[in-house]
């Protein structure tokens, strides 16, 4: 691909981009983007929302959302980032100037940066749960425990604001540490080793789950659709989760795409990331549900699901303390690489906009996010009865934590994704899209149609239906 002749929005800023650093290879981008995509969403959230929404039919809708909405939008997001070559907000602004579009589009990126910030505030709290379980597993506390005893460990953790705050603080500090070091030397190094290790360990756990005698039941639960169990709210949750799990609608793929060398195929790269992300989620489901059924646990147990099922398995299997420790270490790493990606857009924006250096911008963004996280921590115990929007029936009983999760995953992310689709599909010049994607004409026109018509309409319909229903 010819970079010098492509009149991209970066214009005279090539030197600048050299200074910003680039991923050292296509693989590095894939790993970093996968590091962002694969996280608590796959291992913690996917199994529990699948359990809450009745299994197979939900999984099917989720897979459709990934393939028909998520993937095309991911390609659009990476493309916008690479073409703009700067932080999401600036990239969008440069593109609007170049393509003579309304400058108000830059707000799209600003909303996305805000969404990432809000998500990180509670994501870090859950990352903290995972950290605390590293210690629990390593000290042998899971060995031979009953389901009730394991459940009590989880309840005790949530009931203790001090422990939660401690772990949340450690998690945020780790995220800030890497972000402060910059893309190439921080993020890239961390993910190259950790992602493959996580994959291998999950395979091992699936192997263990096969020995429980309930593997077939779990496969049926996950893959035999029973549409009577699917609700319209479930469809919205599946769509929102497709965005969440692929890290879309939050300008993250834009930010990472801005470091992607021009000669790398956006389509192939995005497919690789989506396939790995989906693979990890399904493997997590296959590891968890056999244990749920074997122990007579409730698939719809909610956010505590993995913290109550997997520890049971670790308590019973040979060398369980070792595997348990390893598993939670890797879960922390998966959450960590995602957390890094959630902080990156805001930091990049502060650097560019406010002229702060990387250290100061990381500290400011990180500390603000940490402080907001305290509200989520308190929602789990002292403020568990506090539902700030409880006067509206749809928010009845929802704590601040629940509201942040609901508002980001079900509203901001689909909205962000919708805007990306409209921006790339209807506002940007088609010629620039063709140049960035460099695909065969047939593949391009399929993608372009999906992006212009199918994806926005699907998101809008599901979204509006749920608002009025
Ligand atoms: N995709 C991550 C996960 O599934 O855990 C979470 C996440 C990371 C969401 C980055 C959004 C994001 F921008």
Image (spheres, helix red, strand yellow):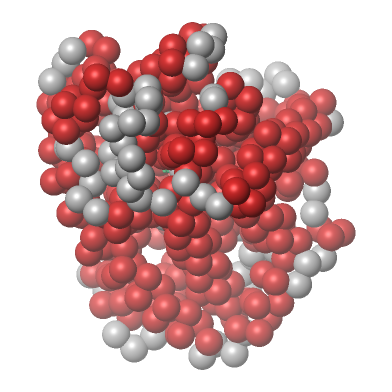
Most foreground residue, 165 or 409: 409
Most foreground residue, 22 or 353: 22
- The answer to whether 51 is drawn above or below residue 251 in the figure is below
The quarter of the rendered structure image containing the N terminus is top left
The answer to whether any part of residue 408 appears in the image is no
Give the side of residue 341 with respect to residue 93, left or right: left
- The answer to whether 56 is drawn above or below residue 263 in the figure is below
Q: Quadrant of residue 328?
A: bottom left
The quarter of the rendered structure image containing the C terminus is top right
Residue 41 x, y percent position in the rendering: 48, 51
Q: Residue furthest front?
A: 5
Residue 140 x, y percent position in the rendering: 27, 74
Most foreground residue, 381 or 412: 412
**Residue at position x 68%, y 81% from top?**
217
Residue 221 x, y percent position in the rendering: 70, 72
Most foreground residue, 181 or 123: 181
Residue 167 x, y percent position in the rendering: 27, 45
**Residue at position x 77%, y 28% from top?**
464
Q: Residue furthest right?
A: 228
Give the side of residue 387 with respect to residue 276, left or right: right
């Amino acid at each position: 691909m010819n970079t010098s002749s492509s009149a991209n929005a970066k214009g005279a800023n090539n030197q600048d981009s050299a200074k910003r650093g680039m991923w050292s290879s296509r693989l590095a981008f894939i790993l970093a983007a996968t590091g962002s995509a694969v996280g608590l969403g796959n291992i913690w959230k996917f199994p529990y929302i699948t359990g809450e929404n009745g299994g197979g039919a939900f999984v099917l809708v989720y897979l459709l959302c990934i393939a028909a909405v998520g993937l095309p939008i991911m390609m659009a997001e990476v493309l916008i980032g690479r073409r703009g070559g700067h932080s999401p907000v600036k990239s969008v602004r440069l593109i609007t100037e170049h393509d003579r579009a309304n400058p108000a589009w830059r707000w799209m990126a600003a909303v996305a940066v805000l969404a990432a910030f809000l998500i990180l505030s509670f994501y870090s709290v859950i990352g903290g749960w995972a950290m605390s379980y590293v210690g629990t597993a390593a000290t042998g506390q899971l060995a031979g425990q009953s389901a009730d005893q394991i459940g009590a460990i989880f309840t005790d953790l949530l009931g203790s604001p001090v422990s939660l705050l401690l772990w949340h603080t450690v998690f945020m500090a780790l995220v800030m540490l890497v972000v402060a070091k910059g893309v190439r030397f921080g993020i890239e190094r961390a993910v190259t080793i950790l992602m493959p290790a996580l994959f291998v360990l999950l395979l091992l756990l699936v192997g263990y789950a096969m020995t429980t005698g309930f593997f077939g039941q779990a496969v049926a639960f996950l893959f035999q659709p029973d549409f009577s169990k699917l609700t319209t709210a479930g469809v919205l949750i599946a769509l929102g989760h497709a965005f969440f799990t692929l890290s879309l609608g939050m300008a993250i793929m834009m930010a990472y795409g801005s470091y992607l060398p021009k000669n790398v195929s956006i389509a192939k790269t995005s497919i690789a990331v989506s396939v790995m992300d989906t693979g990890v989620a399904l493997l997590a489901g296959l590891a968890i549900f056999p244990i749920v059924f074997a122990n007579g646990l409730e698939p719809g147990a909610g956010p505590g699901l993995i913290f109550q099922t997997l520890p049971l398995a670790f308590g019973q299997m040979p060398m369980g303390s070792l595997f348990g420790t390893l598993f939670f270490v890797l879960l922390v790493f998966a959450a960590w690489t995602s957390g890094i990606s959630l902080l990156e857009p805001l930091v990049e924006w502060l650097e560019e906009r406010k002229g702060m250096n990387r250290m100061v911008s990381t500290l400011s963004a990180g500390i603000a996010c940490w402080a907001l996280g305290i509200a989520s921590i308190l929602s789990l115990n002292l403020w568990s009865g506090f539902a700030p929007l409880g006067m509206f029936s749809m928010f009845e009983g929802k704590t601040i934590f629940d509201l942040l999760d609901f508002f980001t995953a079900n509203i901001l992310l689909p909205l962000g994704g919708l805007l990306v689709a409209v921006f790339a599909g209807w506002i940007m010049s088609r010629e620039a899209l063709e140049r960035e994607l460099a695909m065969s004409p047939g593949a391009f026109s399929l993608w372009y149609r999906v992006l212009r018509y199918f994806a926005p309409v699907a998101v809008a319909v599901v979204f509006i239906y749920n608002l009025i229903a």
